[in-house]
Amino acid sequence: MISAAGTQAIFNLRRVQEFVRRFDDMGNVADITQAIEHMESAVSSVITPYIDSYGTLSGILGGLYARRFEYTANVQDIDSAIRHDQNAVESSPSGHADLPSRFNNLGTSYVRRFERTGDLKDIDSAISHLQNAVESTPSGHANLPALFNNLGTSYVRRFERTGDFKDIDSAVSHLQNAVEFTPSGHANLPALFNNLGTSYVRRFERTGDFKDIDSAISHHQNAVESTPSGHPDLQGRFNNLGNSYLNRFERTGDLKDIDSAISHHQNAKAVESTPSGHPDLPGYFSNLGTSYARRFKRTGDLNDIDSAISHHQNAVESTPSGHPDLQDRFNNLGNSYLNCFERTGDLKDINFAISHLQNAVESTPSGHANLSSRFNNLGNSYARRFERAGDLKDINSAISHHQKAVESAPSGHAGLPRWLNNLGSSYSCRFKHSQYFPDIEYSITSYRRGAASNGAPSMRLKSAKLAARHSSIHDHFHCINDFSLAITLLSEVAGLEQTVHRRHINLLDHSDFLGAAVAVALILGKPDSALEWLEQGRCLVWNQINQLRTPVGSLRMNHPTLANRFIEVAKALESHGTRSSPFSSGRLAEEIRIQDDTLNHTSLAADYRQLLEEIRSLPDFDDFLQPPKAVNLLSSIPSDGPVIILSILNTRCDALALIAGLSEPLHIPLNDFSLVEAETLKKALQVDLLKEAEVDDRERGMRRVSESWESMSGILRALWDKVVQPIVVALGYSPNPSARRRIWWCPTGPLAFLPLHAAGIYGTSYKPGLCVSDFAVSSYTPTVQSLNQKAAASSTTRKCTDILLINPNTPSLPAIPFTQKEIYDLKLIMNKPHIRTLLLEDDAATMDKVKADMQTCNWVHFACHGIQDVGDPLKSGVHLRDGRLELLEIMRQKLSNPEFAFLSACQTSKGDLKLSEEVVHLAAGMLAAGYRGVVGTMWSISDRHGPEFAKWFYEYLLENMGTDGLDSTKAAYALDYATRKVRDTLGEGDDAFLTWVPYVHFGY
């Protein structure tokens, strides 16, 4: 028989079930309160000897208190939940089937109380009990994934509080187990994806490792994708996906990431649909506000910062006093006011910023993982107010708080470069005010520490550049090391985990710094350092592609397995890097596909770095693919002429002549030339000589060359008088037609857009010895190493026997009638026994056909429209029948035996103004695709004289041809010959300049 007490307990349990169902349906707190009251009665009615029932009922009661706490956030409820969960555990003997779940419930309640109070003892207790739950659960048990999830999540919470790196590694490990042990399609899988994604976000915030944030986005996308529409947790998962994109934006600066962050935060509709008073609402306000604030910093749109401040204000006002997240909400609101002040200059904004950031610092407990960041933000606000108001107390406060940020930061924290950079800037700011020399010393030291710390390469580079600039003035003895580190960090800013397009964006605006570094090296008498920095800091993307295609014969001979792995990863990495920038329509499935590609790309880059480290640890391979030293560059210079590198800065212009047989570069100061003059000459070409006009039958392109012979002759004369002639004199050259040497020009900055190969005095004043072609045959090279490699390969060059002639029909563009004559004339004169010509013209010249025939023909001649795309230089290309063959697509080609390319089209060697040090044009792209030599054009060329010029070029090669075909190593001489024929035929007037000056030779 059942006792009266037992009957009452059963009745109470039934009533509890009714009230819980009603609470689930209606959300009325009174119902869960009634359930608790009946459950309290049921527990009290259990006779003590029936200990198992007591444990079960205590566990249920603890769960009810936890449910009510989630809705009310009343700490008394979670205290009661812990008390009853503890009773349930203590009443369960070792080995009891329900003991793991009771450990789990108790641990989860401690987590909830920690989230409300921030008491570290609670999270320590939570981890202990959740660890017991996992360890007491048999392998393969259906509950094990959920237990791993809860344990992993508790480690995340403790990491957020203490910053202990072991905790976040443990979190990731346990949450990975939770996902891996859960069957596909399981109802809990979306939540597990979500929590694993959050753990990767937290680790990324500490390490800055791209793999972590890419993994976070991938898992959060899976969480959203697998959560049914209308599910109550969908809002939070959209919110977390937005947070992941926000974190990646802060590392990459890619606007697509911050737009995705805001989009997902808005998709969550969390702010609009979450009832007032709900405990999650302040977090939704805060996250959306942070996304708007970050986008404001990128775009400057005041609407974004107004939205940020509004959402952050709501977050603060809706967070209960004493809540552990209130410190974070104050911090975000203060930062938004600081961002607004930096745009408006309104002192009210910076005063609000300091007030809220002070609240954030004061409410953050000692030892908290975010305390360093909050000290830093408060220091920034004081520094900004000092810049505006000039009160010395503010800059002293800035330095004090920045010092505290650095001192309280965990070792290896990814934020250290930023915090040290800000400390250095505050010291520098005070030095400008006080001229107290120790301040500039402290500033340089802080910058150096920031550059050497773990963290985002962009911030480390910023610190390194500032250290170098300051030390070049105040600490000459150490400044070479500072510049050297900064140049090295350039390649990390444009890391292989990014697409080529993204790398070019990240390299914008660094050319001035490279010039400053070279100038300092030359001032200090270190031309070797100048050469190494120029080689390492220019054409970074081309060099990376070249490295990925580097033959590994020696490695294969000694370590074949490692060589095969390296080749496999390098090929895959190049393929990912040269893919087009992804476009998303906003559909989540498409975003997941794009993110999978990004994650694969990031993983390949990490594998590549690991392989490099492994290879360099082997005997005799320590310099494998390391940046070349000056001695190695000089030892491989071609014997038939020097390489002339030109560096220009606002204060000076210098040439470095690399001459075979010399042990160091020959430094040639160009004291009569300046950056202002170079920019003036460049502008003359842009404005006076390349004016926009309708295309007529004289130009192969979208721009017409203005016929301004006096302007052109003035440019060429200025280049001769102030740049080229001093170099020729320093080299000791004489105008002997039978003893002319080669010269390879390697210009930087605005000089990269000027026709150095044509420098001279022309017209009635001309006499032998007044132009560069009287002394040497000119070519260009993007880098010294590229030329050395082409020259070394020339000894085994296979002569050209198969020539591809391309003359497409492009109905969407104006006709250029003389290209057909050019192609037919070439086909006629190449009717030789040792040469086979393949003609692709009109509708046959499609992109697929051209790319296929480029595989079998080692010499290619394009006679068509070409364009330098100003908006996106990687989209520059030549126009074929069915579209534009773009530079990026040319780079992707794995050509079997490329020898030479003649680009008889406009602007094929005209670089991008914003990326002058990257040499982003078609001619350089053809070199990167493997061609050993290229003829291109700096601007639009004359269509009428194009056939004659090309005919003279090939006539020279045919006259000097052996029985094995055309020799591409004579291409520079052929171009020189064609130029002289134009000058002899057309004289020194308008037509002559417009015909020959644009043509240039690249390579060997």
Image (spheres, rainbow, N blue to C red):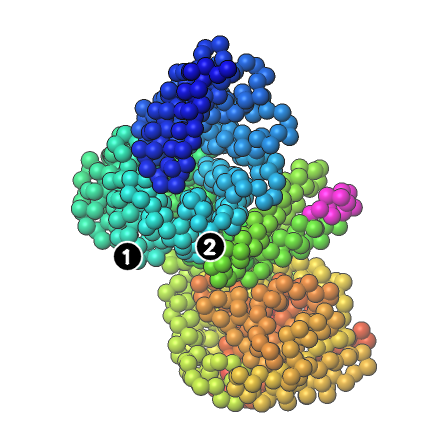
On screen, residue 156 above or below 869: above
Q: In the orientation shown, which residue stands out farthest toward the top? A: 49
Q: 184 or 202, which is in the foreground?
A: 184
Is 559 colored magenta in this rendering?
Answer: yes
Helix, strand or loop for the magenta stretch, by majority: helix
Q: How many marks?
A: 2
Quadrant of residue 734 in the image? Answer: bottom right
Horizontally, residue 395 falls left or right of residue 233, namely left
On residue 980, the disc is none
What are the residue bounds of the magenta stretch? 555-566
Residue type at mark 2 is Asn
Residue at screen point 47% across, 80% down: 703
Residue type at mark 1 is Asn
Residue at screen point 63% across, 57% down: 575
Q: Considering only order in the chain, which callout, 1 or 2, is on the residue closer to the N terminus?
A: 1
On residue 303, the disc is 1
Which quarter of the figure is the C terminus placed in? bottom right
Give the x, y percent position of residue 400.
Answer: 28, 32
Quadrant of residue 614 in the image? Answer: top right
Residue at screen point 70% across, 59% down: 792
According to the picture, the residue beneath numbered tag 2 turns out to be 506
Give the x, y percent position of residue 186.
Answer: 57, 41
On screen, residue 355 above or below 537: above
Can residue 587 be seen?
yes
Is 994 colored magenta in this rendering?
Answer: no
Horizontally, residue 134 falls left or right of residue 621, namely left
Q: Secondary structure at mark 1?
A: helix
Check if mark 2's residue and mark 1's residue have beta carbons within 8 Å. Answer: no
